[in-house]
Image: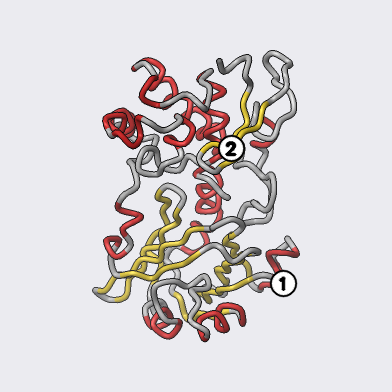
């Protein structure tokens, strides 16, 4: 699943080509149409396809931003405003091209689901191999509470204080620290890959119950999360399975991973251990993270 660094790179890849452009038409794939016909929320969620078109066509994309793992498109039409909220799910991606056939990755070319036709002649194309992603069209963010609940962006001044304040909640105190930092209400945008890497950097065992950590350890965990997220952005994200940039290129963060899906620890040479924590595969070194 794309995490904050991957989503940031998708946002950066499409932003220069779509900002300031008017949406002149929207096309849906047969899978999206068939899903809606039988009452399924396939990609387009919380709104009918006709209403989605009504609230998209004629609107200009004023800006493209990222909030945690979501991409937000701010649309303007006269005095009206709409917001497209998109989550890439397990294997979604946005591409900008003159035609679907120009997408260089065959699977993404085959599994396109939404096309926004822009007045500059380009198409903003949402492809999703597994169809777990989503696009919502809302009048205001409050219509989608999941966005409102997200912690401050990890690179902002208030993020660490917010994170530290979450240790006062009993439900988080009793969680393994790995599970806690995956909560988007605790730290925004930290997914499984970067949580594993951050805890290795902090030398904290992922099974450690959050409430037992010292203040210094809690702070170190946060600092390590920020560190590895920044590394992920600098390296174009992690391309282990389906993730690619908007131009089809792969990230290189996978070349810098210390524990996630690694066999041996680069620090001590011992085997990397795999365990399930909070329903997620967790990779760590028992020797370095004791």
Looking at this view, is 256 or 177 the one in front?
177
Residue name at image x 35 percent, y 54 percent: 147
Q: Residues within 10 Å of mark 1 (few under 14, many from 20)?
A: few
Q: Residues within 10 Å of mark 2 (few under 14, many from 20)?
A: few
- Counting from the top left corner in percent of width and height, residue 284 is at 62, 26
Q: Which mark is residue 43?
A: none
Quadrant (top left/top right/bottom left/bottom right) for the C terminus: top right
Q: Which mark is residue 101?
A: 1
Is any atom of residue 268 visible in this view? Answer: yes
Q: Choose mark 1 or mark 2, whichever is in front.
A: 2
Q: Which mark is residue 276?
A: 2
Residue name at image x 62 percent, y 19 percent: 286
| 24 horizontally vs 192: left or right | left
Residue name at image x 63 percent, y 67 percent: 97
Give the distance between the C-alpha atoms of the residues marked 1 and 2, in whole angstroms: 40 Å
The secondary structure type at the circle numbered 2 is strand
Q: Is residue 179 above or below residue 149?
A: above
The image quarter containing residue 92 is bottom right
The secondary structure type at the circle numbered 1 is helix
| 6 horizontally vs 100: left or right | left
Q: Is residue 7 above or below residue 49?
A: above
Q: Earlier in the sequence, mark 1 or mark 2?
A: 1
Q: How many marks?
A: 2
- Counting from the top left corner in percent of width and height, residue 90 is at 59, 55
Residue name at image x 48 percent, y 74 percent: 41
- Counting from the top left corner in percent of width and height, residue 255 is at 70, 33
Q: Is residue 36 above or below residue 153?
A: below
- Counting from the top left corner in percent of width and height, residue 30 is at 61, 82
Looking at this view, is 272 or 197 the one in front?
272
Is any atom of residue 257 visible in this view? Answer: no
């Amino acid at each position: 699943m794309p995490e904050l660094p991957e989503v940031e790179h998708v946002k950066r890849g499409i932003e220069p080509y779509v900002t300031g452009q008017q949406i002149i038409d929207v096309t849906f794939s047969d899978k999206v149409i068939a899903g809606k016909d039988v009452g399924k929320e396939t990609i387009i969620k919380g709104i009918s396809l006709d209403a989605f078109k009504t609230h998209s066509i004629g609107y200009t994309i004023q800006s493209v931003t990222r909030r945690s793992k979501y991409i937000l498109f701010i649309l303007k039409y006269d005095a009206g405003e709409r917001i497209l909220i998109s989550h890439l799910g397990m294997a979604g991606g946005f591409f900008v091209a003159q035609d679907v056939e120009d997408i260089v990755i065959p699977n993404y070319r085959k599994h396109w689901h939404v096309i926004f036709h822009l007045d500059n002649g380009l198409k903003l194309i949402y492809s999703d191999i597994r169809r777990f992603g989503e696009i919502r069209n809302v009048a205001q963010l409050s219509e989608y509470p999941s966005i409102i609940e997200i912690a401050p962006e990890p690179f902002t001044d208030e993020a660490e204080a917010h994170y530290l304040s979450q240790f006062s909640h009993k439900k988080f105190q009793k969680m393994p620290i790995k599970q806690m930092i995956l909560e988007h209400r605790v730290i925004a945008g930290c997914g499984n890959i970067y949580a594993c890497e951050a805890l290795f950097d902090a030398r904290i065992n992922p099974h450690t119950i959050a409430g037992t950590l010292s203040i210094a350890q809690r702070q170190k965990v946060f600092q390590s999360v920020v560190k590895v997220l920044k590394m992920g952005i600098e390296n174009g994200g992690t391309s282990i399975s389906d993730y690619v940039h908007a131009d089809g290129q792969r990230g290189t963060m996978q070349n810098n991973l210390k524990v996630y899906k690694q066999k041996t620890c680069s620090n001590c040479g011992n085997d990397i251990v795999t365990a399930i924590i909070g329903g997620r595969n967790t990779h760590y070194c028992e020797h370095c993270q004791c």
